Amino acid sequence: FFGGKVYARRLVARDASRYYNFGIISFAAGARNKLHTHTCDQILYVTKGRGIVATEREEVVITEGDTALIPQGEKHWHGATPDSDFDHISLLTADSKTDIVE
Protein backbone atom coordinates (compact mmCIF):
# COMPACT_ATOMS: atom_id res chain seq x y z
CA PHE A 1 0.00 0.00 0.00
CA PHE A 2 2.82 2.42 0.83
CA GLY A 3 5.99 3.48 -0.97
CA GLY A 4 8.81 4.52 1.38
CA LYS A 5 8.84 4.41 5.17
CA VAL A 6 5.38 4.89 6.66
CA TYR A 7 4.20 4.21 10.20
CA ALA A 8 0.63 4.05 11.46
CA ARG A 9 -0.46 4.34 15.09
CA ARG A 10 -4.04 4.06 16.25
CA LEU A 11 -5.16 6.87 18.53
CA VAL A 12 -8.33 4.95 19.42
CA ALA A 13 -8.27 1.15 19.55
CA ARG A 14 -10.15 -0.53 16.69
CA ASP A 15 -12.72 -2.06 19.05
CA ALA A 16 -13.07 1.03 21.28
CA SER A 17 -15.44 2.85 18.93
CA ARG A 18 -18.06 1.37 16.69
CA TYR A 19 -18.19 4.66 14.75
CA TYR A 20 -14.62 5.86 14.08
CA ASN A 21 -11.19 4.75 12.89
CA PHE A 22 -8.82 7.42 14.26
CA GLY A 23 -5.04 7.27 13.90
CA ILE A 24 -1.86 9.13 13.09
CA ILE A 25 0.17 8.27 10.00
CA SER A 26 3.84 9.26 9.69
CA PHE A 27 5.52 9.43 6.27
CA ALA A 28 9.29 9.77 5.78
CA ALA A 29 10.30 12.42 3.23
CA GLY A 30 9.15 11.29 -0.23
CA ALA A 31 6.99 8.41 1.04
CA ARG A 32 3.39 8.15 -0.12
CA ASN A 33 0.53 5.73 -0.50
CA LYS A 34 -0.96 4.41 -3.73
CA LEU A 35 -4.01 5.83 -5.48
CA HIS A 36 -7.01 4.57 -3.51
CA THR A 37 -10.61 5.21 -2.47
CA HIS A 38 -12.60 4.91 0.76
CA THR A 39 -16.25 4.02 1.25
CA CYS A 40 -16.69 7.07 3.50
CA ASP A 41 -15.37 10.64 3.59
CA GLN A 42 -11.82 10.88 4.96
CA ILE A 43 -10.55 13.78 7.06
CA LEU A 44 -6.82 14.44 7.33
CA TYR A 45 -5.35 16.90 9.84
CA VAL A 46 -1.65 17.73 9.42
CA THR A 47 0.38 17.63 12.64
CA LYS A 48 3.92 17.87 11.20
CA GLY A 49 5.80 18.76 8.03
CA ARG A 50 4.69 19.21 4.44
CA GLY A 51 2.64 16.74 2.48
CA ILE A 52 0.66 16.32 -0.69
CA VAL A 53 -2.97 15.31 -1.11
CA ALA A 54 -3.64 14.44 -4.74
CA THR A 55 -6.63 13.42 -6.83
CA GLU A 56 -6.71 12.50 -10.50
CA ARG A 57 -7.09 16.23 -11.28
CA GLU A 58 -4.80 18.07 -8.86
CA GLU A 59 -2.07 17.95 -6.21
CA VAL A 60 -2.28 20.23 -3.17
CA VAL A 61 0.58 20.83 -0.72
CA ILE A 62 -0.62 20.88 2.88
CA THR A 63 1.27 21.86 6.03
CA GLU A 64 0.94 21.76 9.80
CA GLY A 65 -2.52 22.88 10.91
CA ASP A 66 -4.19 22.25 7.53
CA THR A 67 -7.22 19.99 7.14
CA ALA A 68 -8.16 18.05 4.01
CA LEU A 69 -11.57 16.50 3.34
CA ILE A 70 -11.56 13.72 0.77
CA PRO A 71 -15.09 12.78 -0.33
CA GLN A 72 -16.27 9.19 -0.32
CA GLY A 73 -15.19 7.39 -3.49
CA GLU A 74 -12.68 10.08 -4.58
CA LYS A 75 -9.56 8.51 -6.11
CA HIS A 76 -6.63 10.02 -4.19
CA TRP A 77 -3.23 9.53 -2.64
CA HIS A 78 -1.33 11.36 0.09
CA GLY A 79 2.21 11.46 1.39
CA ALA A 80 5.25 13.55 2.21
CA THR A 81 6.91 16.05 -0.09
CA PRO A 82 10.41 14.97 -1.21
CA ASP A 83 12.06 17.36 1.27
CA SER A 84 9.97 16.90 4.44
CA ASP A 85 8.68 14.25 6.79
CA PHE A 86 4.91 14.44 7.13
CA ASP A 87 2.43 13.35 9.82
CA HIS A 88 -1.33 13.53 9.66
CA ILE A 89 -4.24 12.35 11.72
CA SER A 90 -6.73 10.31 9.69
CA LEU A 91 -10.41 9.98 10.54
CA LEU A 92 -12.63 7.41 8.81
CA THR A 93 -15.76 5.57 9.84
CA ALA A 94 -15.09 2.27 11.60
CA ASP A 95 -16.73 0.28 8.80
CA SER A 96 -14.96 2.09 5.94
CA LYS A 97 -13.25 0.01 3.29
CA THR A 98 -10.17 1.10 1.35
CA ASP A 99 -9.70 0.00 -2.25
CA ILE A 100 -6.39 0.38 -4.10
CA VAL A 101 -6.82 1.72 -7.66
CA GLU A 102 -4.56 -0.24 -10.03
Image: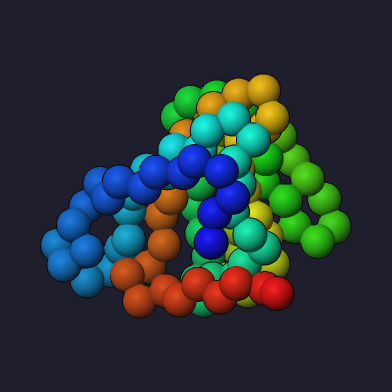
Residue 51 showing in the rendered view: no
What residue appears at the point 67 percent right and 23 percent down from the top-left corner?
A: 83
**Residue 59, percent from left and from top:** 78, 45
Residue at the limit of the structure toward the left, as seen here: 16
Position of residue 22 relative to residue 82, above or below, is: below
Position of residue 57 relative to residue 30, above or below, is: below
26 vs 35, left or right, is left
16 vs 65, left or right, is left
Position of residue 23 relative to residue 82, above or below, is: below
Residue at the limit of the structure toward the right, as seen here: 57
**Residue 9, percent from left and from top:** 30, 46
Quarter of the view holding residue 24: top left
* Front residue of this view, candidates 100 and 88: 100
* Front residue of this view, candidates 21 and 85: 85
What residue appears at the point 82 percent right and 50 percent down from the top-left corner?
A: 58
**Residue 36, percent from left and from top:** 62, 67
Quarter of the view holding residue 51: top right
Number of dots carrying numbers: 0
What residue appears at the point 32 percent right and 61 percent down from the top-left corner?
A: 21
What residue appears at the point 56 percent right and 75 percent down from the top-left corner?
A: 99
* Front residue of this view, candidates 2 and 39: 2
Quarter of the view holding residue 67: top right
**Residue 10, percent from left and from top:** 27, 50
Residue 4 showing in the rendered view: yes
How is the model colour-coded? rainbow
